[in-house]
Image (cartoon, rainbow, N blue to C red):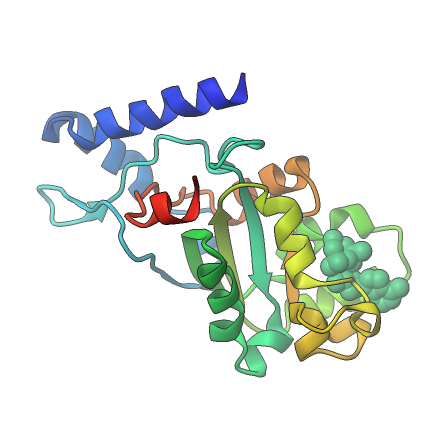
Amino acid sequence: MFARSARSIASMARTRGATSTRSMSAVAARVIATPLYAKAGLALATAAAGTTIIATSNNKAAQCDALPVYGVPGTNQERTFLAVKPDGVQRGLIGDIIARFEKRGYKLVGLKMVWPTLEMAQDHYADLSKKGFYGGLCKFFSSGPIVCMCWEGKDIIKQGRQMLGETQPLASKPGSIRGDFSIDLGRNICHGSDSPEAAEHELKMWFPEGVNDWGKAVDSSVYE
Ligand code: DAT
Ligand code: MG
């Protein structure tokens, strides 16, 4: 059932890619709407390679976003929210972390740097609000910019968690991101959604403006 809906969504995306300027203007107007978190004055940049760019008459650009921001769980269009936390940014690990997912064959469909407010951190970690470490965690998460990413591909939610490693870096296997790059629990450098429900919540929260539905030319060399 998921595969069928994914196919129809994919064909919708293809059709949309060929639609007229008039219908694209409506898409552009929607995508250009100011993101919630950009209003905090803290969103620094959004970029993604290979985006389908549509130039509109007022010289702004936007992309088609036929899929919901959280993709289609259980298909090759499954999506997850991954973030390089303030410690990972400080330590210059953004490129290394992105490279692992790129080299594995996953597709980056959303990327931006955001300096979270304390309120944003509290919202992001709301499920941990009863824990004793919640206050310190939120304070740290809002202490500097993070890199927000939306990654797409088969089984990405579970595979993403495995590639990050265990919450406790000391229990993380060498070869995992946390196992290779971190030591202490409160400085484990990265975040990943732990379920389809979490991915939906987090992607809606961090990418209210949507992401980029672009076709990756080498997908036929990644998927059989
Ligand atoms: P994860 O980041 O692996 O999803 P989590 O959601 O349980 O783990 O916790 C969020 C972050 O909070 C985690 O990356 C590090 C921190 N944390 C978790 N357990 C902690 C603890 N017992 N003491 C201090 N910080 C903790
Ligand atoms: Mg978690």
Say how many tags the image has. 0
On the question of residue 133 being in view, the answer is: no
Query: Against 76, is 52 above or below?
Result: below
Q: Residue furthest bottom?
A: 91
Where in the figure is residue 83, as x and y percent of width and height? 57, 61
Query: Against 131, is 145 above or below?
Result: below
Q: Which of 189 and 143 is in front in this view?
A: 189
- Is 22 on the left-hand or right-hand side of 204? left
On the question of residue 67 being in view, the answer is: yes
Where in the figure is residue 110, as x and y percent of width and height? 42, 52
The residue under the point 54% across, 16% down is 1
The residue under the point 78% across, 71% down is 169
- Is 57 on the left-hand or right-hand side of 78? left
Where in the figure is residue 131, as x and y percent of width and height? 89, 56
The residue under the point 81% across, 72% down is 185
Where in the figure is residue 134, as x and y percent of width and height? 82, 60
Query: Against 77, is 137 above or below?
Result: below
Q: In which quarter of the image is ligand 1?
A: bottom right
Query: Against 86, is 78 above or below?
Result: above
The residue under the point 46% across, 42% down is 208
- Is 68 on the left-hand or right-hand side of 90? left
- Is 137 on the left-hand or right-hand side of 120? right
Q: Residue furthest front?
A: 224
